[in-house]
Image: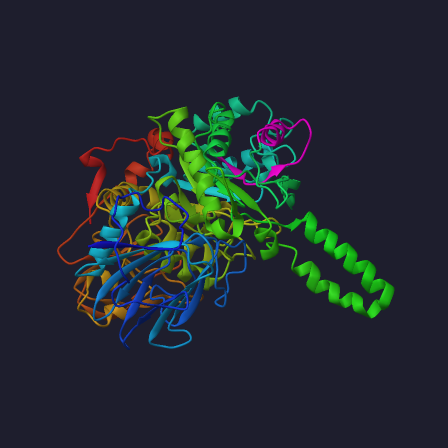
């Protein structure tokens, strides 16, 4: 059962697309006091949801702020990340799902201030609240997913292994990546192009000096089974003669300041304007620009910097100039105070409060709708793809998101680091994002920031073989972490082979989760509801008929696992063989070498995997990387 409550004058986010009548009166069992929603828990109540949020699957015991934020340091104290997903599931004496459809800043205090109290505080009260009651957690998820609409379906080729870096800035660098994988006989389906492929970081441009005959180059890689996937940023460079800029100015398509002038910020291109994606006309205009690249053969994109990220605004720079003059005229010692001023330049809340949108002819302050920005940028693309080719599936995933964007795109988990703890954080976000409708998801394997080690990348790949988006990505200035750049290339080759052996199974589970409005990745507590110990386990997940339990600690020969039922322990070995061992329910220490991929098959179940000999068949290489090979029953083995 779903009930809808209205507070103030809500912005129509279109996160919920089902037609639900509004209730009269107050929400049962949830107090509303001082513009705050309060729910009392007992000691055993667990709270799930919040999508892309820090810490555990059970969100109890911390504070989370729903406000899309460009922050590359994902330490445990961070309250906001790139996404804003205001859906929680309360699992206590009663089962409730609550979606706070408010696109501004919302704080979720889940037993942080008072251990038995959930306190949800929106910065402004204009919102809809949807309350779902059901007999169990899985039914709550299904009911919620039904009212927010079917999740985005990514093309099958996007389930192949992808390689990325900031940046493969020219054809020679991309060719070197292709050669590195070819020379080491490693399969690869996509290579990602970060901002340096553009002309001066201008969207929908290709630097012809760096990528001559780009359309032909895209085709030549496609003939090998490899797609090029370019990045698109939210900011539009202010530059006379640049058509996107000039069209945006002419048609009033950019976000405004209080006086109605185009708001000026700075991101990668330097001074920029932000398209007003909350305006339907702007979405159509910007979305149609993707055709410039699809006409060159591009079939997938990743949208970035769309929180929107701000390096600085003209207003804040002017303030600092005034401060410098003031401080230097008083005392040079005061210059130390400037460090704080400079640190406040990026993503300053005052800048967001100074921006305005045109929503159906109404002027709306950006801060009130901040979390809708990245959602509507990807919506612009998703809607455009249907106009460009309604029968084709394009890859689209985004950094910033809000519930509703799941119908148009997937997400990656942003600028993580080469930290062992981030393998675990990656794992814990998977079911939480599924609850909010996001199925095509994955993290930067190996970590984006910092220097990766060989064992960390291998262990992370062993998790990544199960995630819909499997992409190795790293930052400029860090160690080159392409799989062929490490010592044990044969081990990397075989881990990547496992992905393609499991790909039919993974893709089928993905499609089933979409069709059934279900989780692809389930916490143990969602499957073994009466098993108290399963409810405490957060580093093992159920994926269809298997359980995954990656190793995420350094210098270990394996890990402890809890089996709620009898299972078969399976390892894909370095030599391509499959090891199987039946285990009884209970706690076990299982040995998993750094070059092996573990999984557990549930009692009485089995899965089909592509035979190793088929994956190694050179005549099938292109169609395997293209993910278009049509396997026969003889190509599979049952484990």
- 276 and 474: which is toward the camera: 276
The image shows residue 194 at horizontal and vertical percentages of 55, 40
The image shows residue 62 at horizontal and vertical percentages of 42, 70
For this orientation, the residue located farthest to the right is 329
Q: Quadrant of residue 28?
A: bottom left
The image shows residue 340 at horizontal and vertical percentages of 69, 64
- 245 and 456: which is toward the camera: 245
Is 181 situated above or below 225?
A: below
Q: Is residue 240 magenta?
A: yes
Q: Is residue 497 visible?
A: no
The image shows residue 405 at horizontal and vertical percentages of 39, 44
Q: Is residue 418 visible?
A: yes
Give the residues in magenta: 229-251
- 182 and 66: which is toward the camera: 66
Left or right of residue 417: residue 638: left
Is 234 situated above or below 6?
A: above
Q: Is residue 470 magenta?
A: no
- 526 and 557: which is toward the camera: 526
Is 552 situated above or below 196?
A: below
The quadrant of the image that shows the N terminus is: bottom left
Q: Residue at x 20, y 52 (%)?
A: 545
């Amino acid at each position: 059962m779903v009930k809808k409550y209205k507070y103030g004058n809500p912005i129509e986010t279109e996160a919920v697309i089902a037609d639900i009548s509004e209730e009269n009166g107050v929400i049962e069992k949830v107090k509303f006091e001082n513009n705050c929603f309060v729910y009392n828990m007992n000691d055993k109540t667990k709270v799930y949801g919040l999508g892309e949020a820090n810490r555990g699957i059970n969100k109890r015991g911390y504070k989370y702020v729903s406000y899309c934020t460009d922050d590359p340091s994902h330490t445990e104290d961070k309250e906001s990340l790139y996404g804003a997903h205001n859906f929680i599931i309360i699992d206590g004496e009663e089962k409730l799902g609550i979606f706070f459809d408010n696109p501004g800043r919302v704080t979720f205090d889940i037993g942080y201030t008072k251990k038995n109290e959930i306190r949800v505080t929106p910065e402004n009260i204009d919102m809809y609240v949807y309350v779902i009651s059901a007999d169990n957690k899985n039914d709550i998820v299904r009911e919620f997913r039904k009212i927010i609409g079917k999740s985005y379906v990514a093309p099958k080729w996007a389930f192949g292994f992808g390689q990325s870096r900031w940046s493969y800035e020219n054809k020679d660098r991309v060719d070197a990546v292709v050669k590195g994988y070819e020379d080491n006989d490693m399969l690869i389906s996509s290579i990602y192009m970060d901002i340096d492929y553009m002309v001066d970081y201008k969207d929908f441009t290709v630097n012809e000096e760096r990528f001559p005959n780009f359309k032909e180059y895209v085709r030549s890689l496609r003939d090998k089974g490899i797609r090029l996937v370019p990045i698109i940023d939210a900011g539009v460079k202010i530059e006379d003669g640049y058509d996107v800029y000039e069209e945006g100015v002419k048609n009033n398509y950019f976000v405004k300041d209080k006086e109605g002038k185009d708001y000026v910020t700075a991101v990668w291109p330097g001074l920029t304007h932000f398209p007003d994606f909350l305006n339907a006309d702007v979405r159509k205009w910007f979305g149609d620009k993707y055709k410039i690249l699809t006409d060159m053969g591009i079939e997938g994109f990743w949208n970035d910097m769309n929180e929107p990220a701000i390096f600085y605004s003209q207003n804040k720079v002017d303030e600092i100039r005034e401060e410098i003059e003031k401080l230097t005229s008083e005392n040079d010692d005061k210059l130390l105070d400037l460090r704080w001023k400079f640190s406040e330049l990026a993503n300053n809340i005052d800048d967001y409060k100074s921006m305005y949108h045109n929503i159906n002819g109404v002027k709306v302050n950006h801060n009130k709708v901040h979390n809708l920005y990245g959602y509507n940028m990807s919506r612009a693309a998703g809607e455009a793809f249907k106009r460009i080719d309604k029968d084709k599936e394009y890859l689209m995933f985004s950094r910033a998101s809000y519930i509703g964007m799941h119908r148009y795109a997937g997400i990656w988990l942003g600028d993580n680091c080469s930290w062992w703890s981030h393998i675990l954080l990656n794992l814990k976000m998977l079911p939480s994002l599924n609850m909010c409708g996001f199925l095509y998801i994955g993290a930067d394997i190996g970590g984006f920031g910092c220097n990766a080690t060989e064992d960390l990348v291998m262990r992370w790949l062993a998790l990544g073989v199960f995630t819909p988006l499997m992409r190795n990505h790293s930052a400029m200035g860090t160690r080159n972490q392409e799989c062929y750049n490490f010592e044990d290339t044969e081990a990397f080759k075989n881990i990547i082979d496992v992905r393609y052996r499991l790909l039919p199974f993974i893709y089928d589970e993905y499609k089933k989760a979409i069709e059934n409005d279900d989780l692809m990745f389930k916490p143990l507590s969602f499957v073994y509801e009466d098993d108290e110990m399963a409810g405490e386990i957060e580093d093992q997940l159920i994926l269809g008929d298997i359980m995954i339990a990656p190793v995420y600690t350094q210098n270990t020969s394996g890990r402890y696992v809890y089996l709620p039922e009898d299972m078969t322990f399976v390892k894909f070995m370095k030599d391509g063989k499959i090891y199987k061992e039946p285990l009884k329910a209970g706690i076990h220490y299982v040995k998993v070498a750094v070059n092996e991929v573990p999984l557990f098959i549930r009692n009485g179940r089995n899965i089909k995997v592509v035979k190793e000999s088929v994956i190694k068949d050179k005549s099938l290489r292109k169609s395997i990387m293209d993910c278009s090979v049509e396997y026969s029953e003889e190509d599979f083995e049952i484990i």
